[in-house]
Amino acid sequence: MDVKKFGIVGCGHIGRRHAAVLDHYEFAQPVSVCDIVEDRAREQAELYGGISVFKNFEDFIKEDFDVVSICTPHHLHKPMALAAIKTGKHVVVEKPMALSSRDASEMTQAAKDAGLKLYVVKQNRYNVPIQLVEEALKNNRLGKIYMVQCNVLWNRHQEYYDQSDWRGNKEKEQGALFTQASHFIDILVWWFGKITDAKTVMDTQAHNIEIEDCGQTSVKFDSGVIGSISWTTNVYNKNFEGSITIIGENGTVKVGGAYLNKVEFWDVKSYPLPENISFVDLPNNYGKYQGSSSNHHKVIEEVVKDLNGERSNIVEGLEGAKSIEAIETIYKGANA
């Protein structure tokens, strides 16, 4: 594959992950980094060598590279994506793609009009258990799906919110569903379709923040499946559960683990789990970076394949926007 040059804006936890993944491959090269904390950007440049450093995004985006990885706080995704597209760059944007479906649509249309690609990071779709369930659903192994239950029961101390001015801020973060539950909701709408109705209750009970720290919703998908989603950042001490359980006519499955990376229950008629494969996606380890959830490297592989004209299953703007629409529906359900 032709080598693609990447610039990374945002050198926090996720930005460092992107840099390490890009450095790992011969066909992807990190060439420029940008962060308002210049020392943070310079640290990444020194780690990988030969990388230009910028504090100002407007200067950074004028640099000579093919793709910009947007790894900044949520509220910056739209303006940075539009600016990147305007300067002829393809875009890889972290979750959430945007903070409204209107913004997501504007981003997608801008990329289309410019003849450029807008990719959305959905790394959990590549998890081994998720792929196993996807295959079972695609082949109708579970028969009619009756219901699905999703739990995102995690811990975030007040210090987590105090670290950055955007966390817990209504305008800049919008809500916990955009941050903690975004990938889970992406999987749900991928499998079961658009959320057409939601009845939601939520509250802020344990943190000094403007957004909710716990909530529950009952939803209906356009496929006819009913579901429930429970989410919180109030779990004592450490994350407790992140799971999706599917109840079907011919089977029941539960995917859990820390990041939807473990099969916790599998009982499907005439369709046992395959033998001799690992069901646990290991945490990221890209030499100079060790992280938590898996499979950012698969996202980058698919991006480069797509840009080289090869068949790819990367998530682009229209698909990525579906989870944003679902989150909006859930929040609207709290006011119904």
Image (spheres, rainbow, N blue to C red):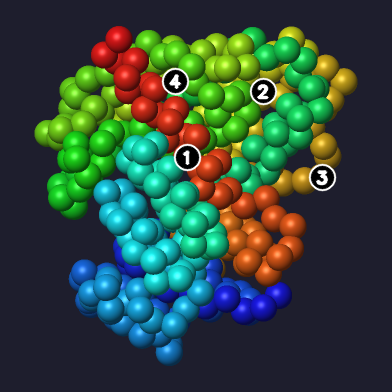
What amino acid type should be assigned to the residue bearing mark 1?
Ala
Position of residue 61 measured from the top left corner of the image (x, y, whole percent) = 35, 74
Query: In the image, what residue occupies the spot 70% across and 55% down?
Result: 312
Lower position in the chain sequence, tag 4 or tag 2:
4
- Please tell me the numbered disc located at residue 141: none
Return the residue at label 2: 253
Pair 1/3: label in front: 1
The span from disc 2 to disc 1 (Cα, nearest Å) is 27 Å
Query: In the structure shown, which secondary structural element does the residue marked by tag 1 occupy?
Result: helix
Q: Residues within 10 Å of mark 1 (few under 14, many from 20)?
A: many
Lower position in the chain sequence, tag 3 or tag 2:
2
Return the residue at label 4: 229
What amino acid type should be assigned to the residue bearing mark 2?
Val
Pair 2/1: label in front: 1
The span from disc 1 to disc 3 (Cα, nearest Å) is 36 Å
Position of residue 233 measured from the top left corner of the image (x, y, whole percent) = 30, 32
Give the residue at the far front of this rendering.
113
In the image, residue 143 sits, relative to residue 187, either above or below, namely above
Tell me the quarter of the picture where residue 239 sits.
top left
Q: Residues within 10 Å of mark 3 (few under 14, many from 20)?
A: few
Dividing the image into 4 quarters, which one contains the N terminus? bottom right
In the image, residue 137 sits, relative to residue 35, either above or below, namely above
Return the residue at label 3: 276
Query: In the structure shown, which secondary structural element does the residue marked by tag 2 occupy?
Result: strand
Tell me the quarter of the picture where residue 223 sits.
top right
The span from disc 4 to disc 3 (Cα, nearest Å) is 33 Å
The span from disc 4 to disc 2 (Cα, nearest Å) is 16 Å
Lower position in the chain sequence, tag 2 or tag 1:
2
Asked whether the beta carbons under mark 4 and mark 3 sit within 8 Å of each other, the answer is no
Pair 4/3: label in front: 4
